[in-house]
Image (tube, rainbow, N blue to C red):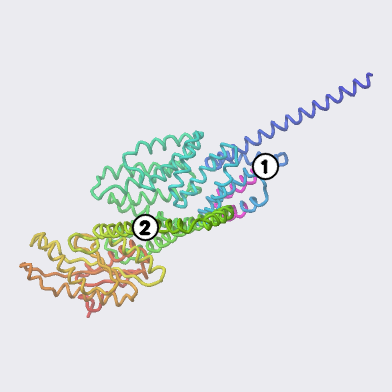
Amino acid sequence: MNRELLFKQFGTLILLSVSLFLNAQNISKQDYDQLLINADKHKAASKQIFDNSLKQLQKNRNQLSEKQTAYLDYLLIFNQVYNGQYDQAISDFENLFEHIDSTFVKVRIQSSLSNLYAFNRNYRAVFTALQYVTTELPKLDDKELKHTIYLATANSYLLTDRFHLAREFSEILLKDNPNPFKRCRAMAYRQLADIKLNNIDASEDKAVQDIIRFCQPQNQMAVSDLLALNWYEYQFKQLNEAASSEVINRLIVAAEKTCLDIDTKQFKSIITGKEALLAQLYLARDDIRSAQDYAQSVVQDNNQLGNSEHIQKAYQVLETIARRENNFSLAYEYLSQRSEIERDIMADALDKQVAYASVQHDLMAKEIQLQQLSQTNELLTTQQALAAKDRLNQKLITAWLALMVGLLLFWAVRAIIKRKKLESLVELDHLTKILNRKGLEDHVGQLLTRKAGQRQPVHLAIMDLDHFKKVNDDCGHLTGDWVLKYVIYHIKSLLAEGMILGRLGGEEFAIIGSGFKLNTMLDYLEKMRKLIQELDYGESEQPITLSASFGVASSETAGYSMQMLLTQADLALYQAKHNGRNQVVVYQPDGTDTPTVPDSPGSGD
C-alpha cells in the first residue's frame, strides 16, 4: 500500500515537472515572439536595437520553433539591405521563400522583395510580388502584420509611380486604427501620394507640418524628412517668377533643417533630394556659388544612385548657370548629360507602366479562363434555349436590336463629330488659326510615339521673329497681329506633307518635320527664313522689315521627348541670336560646333 502511494506521489511529481517545463517553454516562446516583433519594428528605425535583438535570437536559435526560425532568417537577410547588398538580399529572400511553409513569413518576404525589386527596377517582379501579398493577406489573422504589409505595399506602389494605389493602401491602414508608429508612415505615404497626384495645395501646409511633427517622436526621421522635402519642392514649383525673396529664403531655411538626424549611408537618396532642391532654391535666389556647390554634390553621387530626377535637376541648375555666364560649350555639355538622364527616366517610367499592365493582363487572362470554364454549361444551355424559340420572335428581336444599334450609332457619330469640332477649337490659336501650345503638345506627342516605334527621325525647330517687339511698339499691336497672320499664311505654303506648325506663344512658333533627314529639314527652314526676310509688308502701310532666327533639334540627340526637343531647340535658338540673328542654327550635344545652314547669314560663306 505504501509502495502504491509512493508510486502515485512520484507520478504526480513527474507530471508537475513536465507541466512546469512546458509552461516555461510557453513563456520562452512568447519572449522570442516579442523579441522578433521588436527587431522587426526597429529594422528601419534603429539599427542598434535591431542588431541587439538579432544577436539575442541567434544565441538561442536552437530553442526557436520552425516559424520563429524562418522569421529570424528573414530578419537576418533584411540586415543585408543596410549594407546595400540588394542583389544578395534578393537571392537569399527568394531561396528562403522556396524552403519555408509559414504563410506569415512568406508574405513578409514578398513584401520586402517588392521594395527591393523596385530599387533594382525589376518592375514586373514588383507587381508579381505585390499580387501574391494582396492575395494571401486575407488569410492572416495577425493585425500588426497586416498593418506592416499595408505600409510596405503602399511604399512599393510609391516607388513604382502607382500613386493612386499607394494612397488607397495608406487609407486602408489609417481606417484600421494602427499604432502611432505605423500611423505616422501611413499619413506620410498618403500625403506623398497626394503631392505626386497634385491633390493638394499650398493652403494645406499646416496639415503637412502636423504629420511631420507627429512622426518625429516616433523616431521616423527619414519618413518625415522625405515628406518635408517633397512638400517644399511642391511649394517651390507653385511659385511664379515674381516670387519674393522672403518666400525663397523661408523654403531654404526649412530645407536646410531636414536630414540632420538620419543615416547618410542608408538614406542617401533622401540626402541627394535635399541637395537637389537646395541647388534649385539657391539658384532662384541668385546665389550662384551655393547653387553650383549643391548641384555638383548631387552629380558626384550619380555613380551610387544611377540616373534619377535628382541628378536631372542638378544638371539643369548647372546648365542654367553656364548659360548665364555665357559659357555655351559647358551649357551644351550639361544639357547633353541632362538629355541622357531624361531619356532614362522616361524609359524607366514606361517600363513601370508596361510591367503593371503586363501583370494585370496575366491576372485578367486567368480570371477569364476560370469564368469560361465555369460558364460553359450555362452557355450551352442558353444556346439550346435560344435555338428552340419561335422564328418570328427571333426576327422581331433582331429587328428591334438593329433599330437600337442604328440609333445608337447615329447619336454616337453626332457626338464624335461635335466633340472633334470642340477639340479643334480648343487646340487652335485664335489669331493665326494654327495649333496652339496645347494642340501642338497633343499632336506632336502622338507623332513622337508613332515615330519612336518606327525608329524614324523627328526634327523640331523654334522660329522666333527677330525684334518683333519693335514692330508692336512702333506700329501698334493691331499691325503686329496682322504681321503674324501674314507671315504664317506664307510659311504654311512651304510646309511639306506631314509637317506640323504651331504657335508656342508671342512671336515664337514650332515647326516639326519627320520621316526625312535633318538636312532636308534644314532646307525647308532656310526657305522659310529667306521668305520672311523677302516678304513685302507694304500692305500694312508701315515701314516694316523683318527677319527670323531658327533653333533646330533632332530626335537623334534629344530622343523622342518633346520637352528635350524644345529645350535643345531653344538652346540652338539662343545661339542663333547670340551670333547675330536671321539664321538657322542646329543644336550640337558637345557645344563645340554649332553649325548654321550654309546659306544663312554669318555662316562664313
Q: Residues within 10 Å of mark 2 (few under 14, many from 20)?
A: few
Let me know if residue 569 is in the magenta part. Answer: no
- Secondary structure beneath dot 2 equals helix
Looking at the rendering, which quadrant does residue 47 occupy? top right
Residue 403: assigned label: 2
Q: Residue at x 90, y 24 (%)?
A: 7
The 10 Å Cα crowd at callout 1, few under 14, some 14 to 19, many 20 or more, is: some
Q: Position of residue 59 (x, y in %)?
A: 69, 40
Up the image or down, 372 lies above or below 596; here it is above
Amino acid on which the number 2 mark rests in the picture: Leu
> Magenta-highlighted stretch: main secondary structure?
helix
- Given residues 62 and 418, the one toward you in this image is 418
- Residue at which label 1 appears: 67
Q: Quadrant of the N terminus?
A: top right
Is residue 199 visible to the viewer in this orientation of the structure? yes
Taking the image as shown, residue 237 lies to the left or right of residue 151, namely left
Q: Which region is colored magenta?
A: 71-92
Most foreground residue, 150 or 601: 150
**Nearest-to-viewer mark from 1 and 2:** 2
Q: Residue at x 57, y 43 (%)?
A: 137
Give the distance between the C-alpha atoms of the residues marked 1 and 2, in whole angstroms: 66 Å
Task: In the displayed orientation, state which residue is furthest to the bottom.
Answer: 605
